[in-house]
Image (cartoon, rainbow, N blue to C red):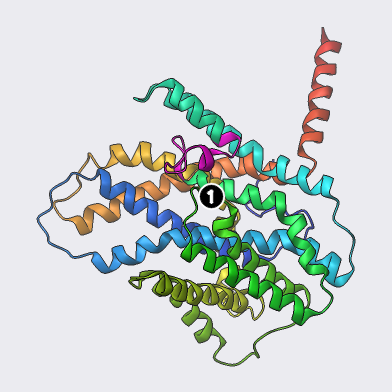
Amino acid sequence: MKYSFRRITTSGNFIPEIDGLRFIAITSVLLLHLYGGLISNDGNIYVDNCNYSYLVTIIQQGHLGVPLFFVISGFILGMPFAKFHILKEKSVSLKKYFLRRLTRLEPPYILVMTFLFFASIYGGKSVYIKIASYFSSILYTHNIIYPDVFPLLNGPAWSLEIEVQFYILAPLIAYIFSIKSPSKRRIFLATSIIFFLSINCFNYLPFKSLINYIQYFLVGFLLVDIYVSDTSLLPKTKFDFLLGFAFFLMIWISGIVEMNSNSQKCFWNLIQMISIFLFFNYVLIHKVFKFLSFNLITNIGGMCYSIYLLHQPILDIFGKHLVKFSFSKYSFINIPIYSILVLFVIMTISSLFFLLIERPCMDKDWYKKLFKESLKFAQKEHFIK
């Protein structure tokens, strides 16, 4: 059997830059949780007094990887609808659309969450709490039922509930692409982005939902509108790489700025949103960051779902025991060793999971093939007997 890390796409149209952007997003989240997991469990006393405050401040912005995933989802899910409305290509079958989401994403998710549930039975909290958390996560309602608590079995799963809400509403929201005038369509999208961004700056919602993050998905819609139209908002120049890199830095810098009022928060969130849009524009439209198309980058980015599902449980289990061993009296030796070992375990297990579980589910007909093979096997066994 031949194994490949190359993502299988429904349309067969592989955009390497998308997986390059996924690489940035998953790396951001991974470093954030790696730092949190190791620091909270590391009880070693070190003789050095190294100041990691600047590095920590940067790493703590890793939560921005989640909004980047939302922008990517908006771009990917919006593409077939944009092609239909703007380019007059074939219509999108809603049956196939929802079936694809179900058969592609649910098996890996349910498998991981179910395994974590049974593995957690031996833990400290009551089985009832774990059962309740398990089913609320499986049904994508944990954010609503337990608004102030991350999913017990797998903390990062909270964002997948936001993704599912968007998956359900995307075909309806995509009617935005039916506006015939490109300028009116894009102005409407830009206005909607600013509107929802403002709502979330000045109003507190009782639980996390799509309303909190829809502006990021709409940025993805705006990007795909420009992408399929084969147009560019900005002229290409010899400074594109520097400009793109500047906007990339601004994404993280705008998250570091201290905000003392809702108005300041709204202003810097808008700066950050514009920076995300322009950075993605330079990656996807101007294609100036060639290294984001390298195989190693796209392979890791392509299996980001597996990494996202597995990294926190691995950190909780392996990382917690690893820090009990001290390799040195110096933090600048111990922490890199811990990080390398944990990342190695995460990437190894995630790679195996991707090859054996997630990637086969990318084949839109995998369940049909599985049923056919199972039927053949049953008939063969019956014939032998």
Q: Residue furthest front?
A: 203
Q: Residue at x 82, y 79 (%)?
A: 181
**Residue that badge 1 annotates:** 159
Query: Percent from the top left, x then y, of residue 29?
Result: 45, 56
Left or right position of 218 against 274: right
Query: Percent from the top left, x then y, of residue 250?
Result: 44, 77
Closer-to-camera residue (195/218): 195
Query: Percent from the top left, x then y, of residue 259?
Result: 35, 71
Magenta-highlighted residues = 137-155
Query: Does 362 appear above or below 224?
Result: above
Left or right position of 36 against 274: left
Query: Percent from the top left, x then y, of residue 214?
Result: 60, 60
Closer-to-camera residue (152/307): 152
Closer-to-camera residue (335/79): 79
Q: Residue at x 12, y 59 (%)?
A: 48
Q: Residue at x 71, y 58 (%)?
A: 77
Is residue 368 at all visible to an observer of this figure? yes
- Quadrant for the N terminus in the image: top right
Is residue 149 highlighted in magenta?
A: yes
